[in-house]
Image (cartoon, grey):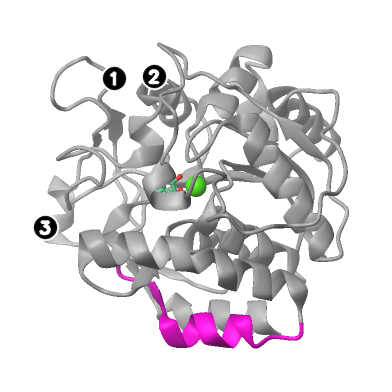
Amino acid sequence: MTTPVYLDCDTGIDDSLALLYLLRSPSVVLRGIGTVSGNIDAATAARNTLDLVALAGHAVPVAVGEHDPRVGSYAGGAPHVHGNDGIGGTALPRAGEPEAESAAQMLVRLAAEHPGELEVLAVGPLTNLAAALDLDPELPSRVKRVVVMGGAAQTSGNVSAVSEANIHNDPEAAAAVVDAPWDVVLVPLDVTLENRFTEEDQSALLDSADPAARAVGAMLDQYFTFYQGVYGFRGCALHDPLAAAILVGEIEATRAPAVPVVVDATGGPGRGQTLCDLRHQRSGTADVPGAHVRVVLDTDRPLGPVLRARLVG
Ligand code: RIB
Ligand code: CA
């Protein structure tokens, strides 16, 4: 039995690692991919996604999603992190064209085709998911689970003092997604920053016989340079791949209490913060009754070696 998955992404260097990991994971099957503006604009993210999927020897429908967040306009992405093209200037052979439907339409359709089975992995701003909730208010009853890379529970943000990029880029959408009555697993910076790729991992990718593995290995130059400047080590955090590995089940969330979560969508200095109410955790790890958002605070083992094994083959 394989799990049908819809991936929503802003491809993106760590998105590319997550995408290739999912394509190489036999227990899941990507039924569709929607793109959103975040690291790069939604149309370029779709181009990157189509090209990498084809280079990996797969065929997955890709739909372009929302260009602008719910409020305001796309602010131009993160070229200092992911490069001007989102993939660190890595040339990929062009392949395929996006679907005619939007990402939100694709998600609604796939949920209807796989009622109660479809799992959603969101590793970019949550604009498409919020748009899908607008299109189909019954969507939460048809989706099995939504795994989101985003937020910061007990650590600082990476865009502002308190907000993480995916939430920061569309807090109104994130609030809509967290408030909707479906099971959400939030994979925040608290855990993603603890899982890393090193230069050794990059060398293994670059030495691989697999062209897609070599391509993501080449992308890491840009990402590593950013991390070296900001975090002081030549390597990178595995944000999006960790969320993917938790969805797949190769990494287990050993501490992930279900707690009330509120996204700050006000205009103040807290905008984009994920307020995770962890007060009850001081006396144990019990879930708060009625809470439907699990916040991952610990995992069973480091992702680096697991990811490397999958990607290098
Ligand atoms: O904060 C990290 C997240 O922002 C990752 O999903 C990265 O790809 C960017 O979208
Ligand atoms: Ca991403």
Residue under label 2, please give it: 172
**Along the line of sight, which residue is nearer the eye, 133 or 292?**
133
Helix or strand or loop: what does disc 1 sit on? loop
Q: Is residue 198 covered in magenta?
A: yes
Residue 70: image location, x then y, percent? 47, 14
Which quarter of the figure is the C terminus placed in? bottom right
Residues shaded magenta = 191-209
190 shown above or below 38: below
State which mark lies toward you, 3 or 1. Answer: 1
Q: Amino acid at mark 1?
A: Ala
Residue under label 1, please give it: 265
Rendered residue at 49%/58% (across/down): 243
125 shown above or below 179: below
Residue under label 3, please give it: 282
How crowded pointer 2 is (Cα within 10 Å; few <14, some 14-19, many 20+) is rated as many
Which quarter of the figure is the N terminus placed in? bottom right
